[in-house]
Image (spheres, rainbow, N blue to C red):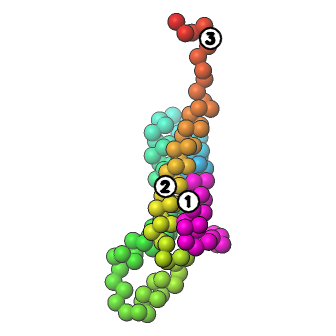
Amino acid sequence: MNLPLHTGLLGALEAGLIAFVIGLLVYALWSWICRRSGLTVGHAIGWGAAIAVLLAAGIDAWNLFYLGVARLESPLYARIALQGIHDVENLGTRVVMQVLGALAGTVLGWWWFSHRRARPPASGDDA
């Protein structure tokens, strides 16, 4: 997806917000799958969070890992590696915001969907 994101902190916040929405949607899908197949809510939270983080921060996290591990011995290889990365100067901030956004979306999805299914006790059941 080629979204025209900003650079700097505003771009990192935008990426975090997109990751938040991804976390909500992935948890909703896993919650539905786990209810249908009889799995626990822990499966939905765990798999939802893992897949949301992979979807939201996957390419940027891989670029951050690659730049830290790969030996860019010549300026040409460094330029080639940096050319395909959007906002190289704030790559780390963007990855952190994407991971936090995906995890926060998963947790908010769990909280929201668990409150929708929970029923308050009847008024006569207080004893």
**Residue found 57% across the figure and 9% down from its top:** 125
Residue 33 position by quadrant? top right
Is-magenta flag for residue 23? no
Q: Upstream in the sequence, badge 3 or badge 1?
A: 1
Report the amino acid beneath label 2: Leu
Closer-to-camera residue (66/39): 66
Is-magenta flag for residue 12? yes
Q: Is residue 33 above or below residue 12?
A: above
**Residue found 53% across the figure and 76% down from its top:** 87
Q: Residues within 10 Å of mark 2 (few under 14, many from 20)?
A: some
Q: Residues within 10 Å of mark 1 (few under 14, many from 20)?
A: many
SS for callout 3: helix
Residue 10 position by quadrant? bottom right
Disc 2/disc 3 C-alpha distance (Å): 40 Å
- Quarter holding the N terminus is bottom right
Extent of the magenta region: 1-21
Q: Upstream in the sequence, badge 2 or badge 3?
A: 2
Which residue position is annotated with label 3?
123
**Residue found 48% across the figure and 83% down from its top:** 82
Q: Is residue 29 above or below residue 125?
A: below
Tell me the tag on residue 16: 1
Disc 3/disc 1 C-alpha distance (Å): 42 Å
Residue 31 position by quadrant? top right
Which residue position is annotated with label 2?
100
Tell me the tag on residue 60: none
